[in-house]
Amino acid sequence: MNYKTIEYLVDDGILTLRLNRPDKMNAFTLDMSDELTHAFYRASDDDDVRVIIVTGAGKAFCAGMDLSVAGNVFGLDETRKPTLAEMAEPDNMPGVRDSGGKVTLAIYDCKKPVIGAINGAAVGIGATMICAMDIRLASERARIGFVFGKIGIAPEGCSTWFLPRIVGMQQSLKWMMTGEIFDAAEAYSGGLVYEVCAADELMSRAYEMARQIADNTAPVSSALIRQMMYRNSAAAHPVEAHKIESLAVFYASKVDGKEGVSAFLEKRPANFESKSSSDMPPFYPWW
Amino acid sequence: MNYKTIEYLVDDGILTLRLNRPDKMNAFTLDMSDELTHAFYRASDDDDVRVIIVTGAGKAFCAGMDLSVAGNVFGLDETRKPTLAEMAEPDNMPGVRDSGGKVTLAIYDCKKPVIGAINGAAVGIGATMICAMDIRLASERARIGFVFGKIGIAPEGCSTWFLPRIVGMQQSLKWMMTGEIFDAAEAYSGGLVYEVCAADELMSRAYEMARQIADNTAPVSSALIRQMMYRNSAAAHPVEAHKIESLAVFYASKVDGKEGVSAFLEKRPANFESKSSSDMPPFYPWW
Amino acid sequence: MNYKTIEYLVDDGILTLRLNRPDKMNAFTLDMSDELTHAFYRASDDDDVRVIIVTGAGKAFCAGMDLSVAGNVFGLDETRKPTLAEMAEPDNMPGVRDSGGKVTLAIYDCKKPVIGAINGAAVGIGATMICAMDIRLASERARIGFVFGKIGIAPEGCSTWFLPRIVGMQQSLKWMMTGEIFDAAEAYSGGLVYEVCAADELMSRAYEMARQIADNTAPVSSALIRQMMYRNSAAAHPVEAHKIESLAVFYASKVDGKEGVSAFLEKRPANFESKSSSDMPPFYPWW
């Protein structure tokens, strides 16, 4: 629980996860990978957390892998010759599996909405990490780059799955193929970030959006929405969504749905009491 | 055929399906679910229908489930404890399956292009229903909301499958996570609606677009295009599309294609005689 | 190697593939299908080619199938009655398989970034062919049309797979359902083309973008990016991307990645020596 590379601060339902190596532009390390992974799983079952905001300490969001370490800078064990068959269980492949993907898979599994507040440079894993978040806000000072081709490697952080679902294939390929660094305005016009803010308004806008979710919606609903959107949208036929949606509405309608409908009819705020830690419906997880 | 909650009006190749409970803001009921489902299957094999326009009577498009009914307002049988295994056959699950998804699956199965003409409030099932339509036009008075999180339930109408395919993941998650109501301008900038019209021009614009399709294209082609786009785009590899497309062009080229090419070369309107009720190629349906 | 319908010109790492039947508006023929297919496979393993630009000779890009030929204008053997089961091996189905899809599947398989430079009319297969390319630039004189419904046939060229991934379902359905011809401005606002250029600046802009890729990125990285983006984005779960990405970064980090990181730290251009013809990592192809 004592993180060295990140801060984990919960206040009034909102977790601020801050990448915290400001003297290194929050460069990513294996420790940061482990700590972020831990933090997302922890927040997923922490009922004091309704919404997560991820940002960086200092001027940068995350400048990518820390290239100053000795040996393989990506933390990989170069003596191995891994095969695709061996990758069937990524947890069994330390020294091989991508440390960025470990984090984005933890984000994918999380029950809580995740807002990225991109305060500055977001490059490499800094750029791919934000693709697994639900909504991205950017300071006008943000600079983003999927620079993998330029340094002779390949995209990671599950970005080849997430990015096209956000911005479509053409924009994804343009950014990935060139490896170019682009600014907040291009990130907005290309569809990667939802809003661009003045640098000194970024966090207040992120908290405003987080409050809008935390104050008005049910925790179990948020968790269901998050998992249903990512998983059902990747199904081959809408009937697969129909099966899950039917059960989700069925069980939620008996609990939070009663309070929600009553509050709506009585024109008062709803008081949802179900917890996403313990009160998910019996068919959850369905995968 | 005597619908109580909708109107089914065919004129010169265009079916206008009007949600028709104007004193209730066209609130959705189990009867409306059954009648809409029936109407889409009927229109699918009605050769007098080339294009379908869906709109609402009065000021609203559809204000969501009718929350004024007694018992479970979603029409669900709360005594049951359904499992995912039981959902394998949704038709066998009355009292459990989502009544909105029943309608959107009927739209998905339909052979005819479907244009949504959103004349006013489209909330809850009113918002998700339009996601299964092919093209959405909105009056400047439209207000749309995926409000499920706010009333403590979960998205339905197969919207977790359809919405991200229209507007991408970030916009989908923003609207779903907040449950906010947004106006026509935001629906347009977010990519949900194709055009925003003055209120008194909405229907004429919808008929204009429907005419453009009905007067210029072949019925069998329309049916093939509709099913190929939704199904092939969800395949894992483009060769799956190639197999279907090859057969579609092969069989169509022998019939309507000959007339279409002749008309093109002779610079005259084509006179397509094939019917989508009886003249679909032998490999259809391929699923 | 002596192409009759196309030109294959390599200069300083960039292949210009020019459709070359200018007196016929570069109308597509079975010969052109075979020659384009051959050219994309050839370029895929030609280390002198880093980036491919596709354009048309004369005023048009490609006006669609050449409708002036005798018999079935799509080159199909009308005596056959093909089934979906028979389509399992498209290579075994001459006279049945779509000649446009043969080309777009060759583009899909290609290791090199592909830029479409749409200099004029791109209709039918001219429109669908560009959907399989990575980035599309259009002259302000471009006119594009998915006209299949108007001539009584159905979409081809794997466009029912590619197009929705570029522009989303609503825009795809609008263009396909109406069969209308639209201009470069609409192609841009709809998301199909990345940029619109003055007619006399189209090729210089295409070469500029090609140079940006060729001069700054590693060949093996480009090939990995291309295949990972198309294939991983269609997976059901991000962990499938994680498996491939982990291996791609693992193997690349030992070779080009070392040079890329050194060059970055030394603030000099990288000198990547790996070839995509012979030096792809051992897990490639993984499918």
Image (cartoon, coloured by chain):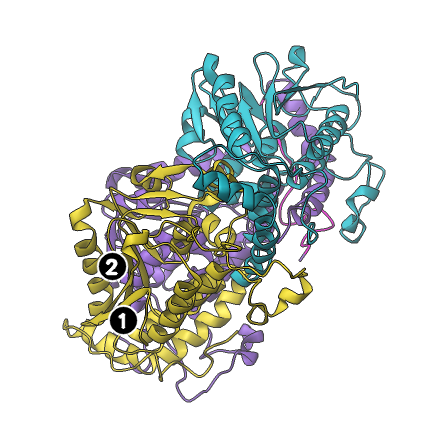
Chain colours: A yellow, B purple, C cyan
Residue B34 placed where, x, y %? Answer: 45, 67
Specify the farthest residue to the front.
A70
Q: Can you identify the residue that label 1 sits on? A: A50
Asked where in the image residue A16 lies, by quadrant, the reply is bottom left
Q: Can you identify the residue that label 2 sits on? A: B180
Using the numbered discs, state the Cα–Cα distance from disc 2 to disc 1 in whole angstroms. 17 Å
Horizontally, residue C217 falls left or right of residue A39, namely right
Residue B155 seen by the camera: no
> What secondary structure is the magenta-colored segment mainly?
loop
| Chain ID, mark 2 | B
- Residue at horizontal 14%, vertical 73%? A268
Asked where in the image residue A21 lies, by quadrant, the reply is bottom left
Dot 1 falls on a residue whose secondary structure is loop
Horizontally, residue B89 falls left or right of residue B126, namely right
Which sits in the foreground, C136 or B119?
C136
Total number of numbered labels?
2
- Residue at horizontal 53%, vertical 66%? A240
Residue B57 placed where, x, y %? Answer: 29, 53
Three-letter code, disc 2: Glu
Residue C255 placed where, x, y %? Answer: 61, 46
Dot 2 falls on a residue whose secondary structure is loop
Q: Are marks 2 and 1 on the same chain?
A: no
Classify 10 Å Cα crowding around label 1: few (below 14), some (14-19), many (20 and above): many
User: Magenta span covers which residues?
Assistant: B268-286
